[in-house]
Image (tube, rainbow, N blue to C red):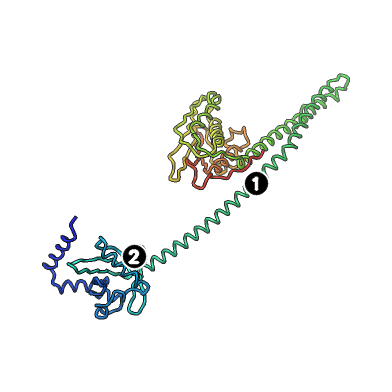
Amino acid sequence: MESKSSRLGWVHTFVLQHLSPEQLAEIIDVTEDGIVTVDSQHRIVLFNRGAARLFGYEPAEVLGQSLNLLIPEQYHQSHPKDMEAFAQGPVDSRRMGSRRTVSGRRKDGSVFPAEVTISKLQHGEQLWLTAIIRDAAERKRYEDALLRLNLELEERIRQRTAELAERNRQLQQKTDENEMFVYSVSHDLRSPLVNLMGFSEELELAVRKIAELLGDPRLPAEVIQPALTLLHADVRESLTYIRTAVERLSRIIDGLLRLSRAGRVEYRWQTVEVGQIAQRVVDAHRTVINQRQAAVAIQALPPAWGDPDAIEQILANLVSNALEALPPSGGGQITIGCQPADSEGYHTYYVADNGCGIDPSLLPRLFQPFQQQSASNRKGEGIGLAIVRRVIERLGGTISVESTLQQGTTFRFTLPGVPPSGGSPASNLPVLS
């Protein structure tokens, strides 16, 4: 790195070889920026035309005057101290105003913001300080406008955030109310349902006893035969319909209770080894897997932040559905895997099968209660996937499905890999028994 003396020597040599003093003075004078030089006593010794345009003074009016002439009065005491500190410091030049706004005062008394670069030159015992000055009013207007826009944007974001928080609170309150209503209705329906099941059993017992009584040979044949036909045809058929309807209603009520509890159970938030849970779920379904001669592959599954029982409930439901969709004759395959985490730290897990697939018309409402996946899968009442979606949403994730008939189905669901900055994704609510 060249020294200060060598640099000045080079400039001095260049000026002597290429420029006359008059040419150098003209270059300085026509510069657009203002150039003001003061001596060690802070008297103005150079004032170019750029400075004259900025401050409104003619050079003859300011030469020999104190620099305070160009500085707002409130800085008359502090500014000379700042310049003296710079003159005594090791830095040859620097930009002024790095910690505060620099201001200049025009001849008419108006004050304007300025960008100022100050430098010093020591020649023998003489010290000169030179300031290159540019009017920053236009830039200041842009900065002020940008600041106002930022403040307005921040206020809009704050208001929007508050509105969304209130809407979320209202939605959560509505969800809680709906879940409580479903729970209450389902709970209240269970008592008369039990009575219906009991009375239907009593009716069947009564039918059997009447059939025994009709076996008495003392009764006329013209009475026995119509009575037996009535019992074994109409009455038993009606009782079968009643019991079937009661059993289905019982399953629906059980599903509604499970759905309501899915939104109210208290979660134990922790880091969950999803791979271990997936293996446990597959082991629990080993009998069905062997019966269907299926192959199940578990890929590397990163940990998730959530509740271990809830995540096991998700995987158990999806694996059970996948097994139901596989061909019973063998050749079925199920894969449990995970895609790379996204920018927000969420993992996308998936359960894929090569089974019968799902009718495209069912996909838009598949996660709604009481929606069957396919005509061949009617063991339940279509509540499982609705519960899965509710559980995943409480864990802070989402679920989606892709399916092609006779080719297979893939369920994908996201879960956070680490605890969110604001705490658990969903509030813990008390368990209803």
Could you say whether the residue bearing mark 1 is in a helix, strand or loop? helix
Closer to us: 269 or 312: 269
As displayed, is residue 162 above or below residue 26? above
Q: Which amino acid type is marked by label 2?
A: Gly
Q: Which residue is mark 1?
A: 178
As displayed, is residue 138 above or below residue 237? below
Closer to us: 299 or 65: 65
- The total of numbered circles placed on residues is 2
Which quadrant of the structure image shows residue 384? Answer: top right
Question: On the rendered image, what quadrant is the N terminus found in?
Answer: bottom left
Could you classify mark 1 by the number of other residues whose Cα lies within 10 Å: few (under 14), some (14-19), or many (20 or more)?
A: few
Q: Position of residue 10 (x, y in %)?
A: 14, 62
Q: Which residue is mark 2?
A: 97
Which quadrant of the structure image shows residue 113? Answer: bottom left
Q: Position of residue 422 (x, y in %)?
A: 51, 48
Closer to us: 310 or 244: 310
